[in-house]
Image (cartoon, rainbow, N blue to C red):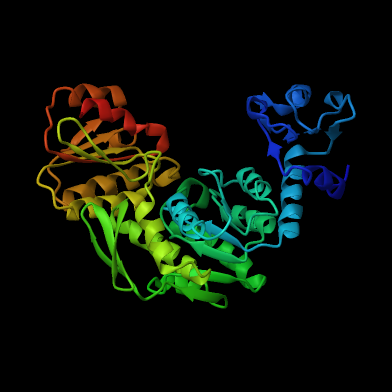
Amino acid sequence: MNIETLYNSYAQHFLVDTDTRKIRKNTIYFALKGANFNGNTFAKEALEKGALLSVVDEARYANQDNIVLVDDVLTTLQELAQYHREKLGIPIIGLTGSNGKTTTKELIHAVLSTQLNVKATFGNLNNHIGVPLTLLSMTPATEIGIVEMGANHHKEIAFLCSIANPDYGYITNFGKAHLEGFGSIEGVIEAKSELYDYLRAHKKSAFINQKNPIQLKKSNGITTLHFDETIQFVEANPLVKILFKGQTIQTNLIGNYNFNNIAVAITIGLHFNISDNNICKAIEGYTPANNRSQIIQTTKNNTVILDAYNANPTSMRAALNSFKELNASNKVVILGDMFELGKDSVKEHQLIVNFCAELDFDNCFFVGQLFSKTNTSYHKLQTFEALKELLLTKNYEQTTFLIKGSRGMALERVLPFID
């Protein structure tokens, strides 16, 4: 079956699934493979649960008419998404960067969806599977799409752009993330700028923070849309407050590092003719979740800034800087290991420890195998259990905590022990 024929089947209901536990009626099931699973084995089950077709790449499972055999299921999924994207003909905003991609995507979605039918990447499904699934979740009713693109190696962003064909692009920042794959900060800049390369080659546009010299340089030759000058930072204590066209907006986001995320969402809203009133309501109404920049009040009158979804040296420093500026008397820093930093892992963890000392924090707890290798007079703990036991000996009240670490550290587990 060629892509056009497969597309005709997909276009009957615009549904695609890859997990038989979540099969929807009249969907097309794509039998993806992983290190520990083979979706081909569930092709028949998907049909029994209501799928219109199952797409497999092993001949022994293509044993009935509505099971389609292809050379490679993942490639076919990507080709179908690319074909669908061209059929849609709607504006697509491509989004990448080292930090803040998901928050920025959700802010843009909140603003645009006040007046438009918008479809955006769900969660952080931003890779070679997530991007196609995002595109295939769009229907003829969709008026604009937001596609988040993640990468930990060179050429990944270029490949995702070839599928999504973005009309607009935005890079949140260039930071020390995934150094294991990119090799260096210079490698990060080169890899993320593959979005700019695509936009330049296809005569598309980019939203740019005009105060960032690296962004200006890397976007040279592209039609650029600068942040609206009426957006001004007021404070982050801990929630970010801004001015927009003279009107004060109180957000539910913490840290001054979120200002650019807010500013680009407003700028994009203005570009797509969203009213000032709707922009303000959307920014004020957005509340982060899933351990991303959440503020939690405990029963002992403690305040927790929980930012435990991910971490890298750049986001760590930004969070610590913002925490230092916070107007609070008793502060405690709890940081977990940062992953995927390659040969620079111990060095980067030591730099974070040193930075905490430079900021003169009194109480810091560093947990994980990497932080435990650093040289510091602060508390170092190899395991979460050791951290838990130490915290149980404390009795914090009216204290403000910053909790941040890579997802694998799952530092939200700390919450019951400081409540």
Residue 407 lies, with reference to residue 177, above or below; the image says above
Front-lying residue, 183 or 355: 355
Residue 369 lies, with reference to residue 108, above or below; the image says above
> Residue 155 location, x and y as percent?
62, 55
> Residue 51 location, x and y as percent?
76, 30
Numbered marks: total: 0
Front-lying residue, 378 or 303: 303
Q: Residue furthest left?
A: 329
Front-lying residue, 395 or 115: 115
> Residue 68 location, x and y as percent?
85, 34
Q: Quadrant of the N terminus?
A: top right
Horizontally, residue 253 falls left or right of residue 4, namely left
> Residue 109 location, x and y as percent?
50, 55
Horizontally, residue 62 falls left or right of residue 133, namely right
User: Residue drawn 56% across and 56% down?
Assistant: 146
Residue 202, picture quadrant: bottom right
User: Residue drawn 66% across and 56% down?
Assistant: 164
Q: Quadrant of the C terminus?
A: top left
Horizontally, residue 50 falls left or right of residue 34, namely right
Front-lying residue, 126 or 343: 126
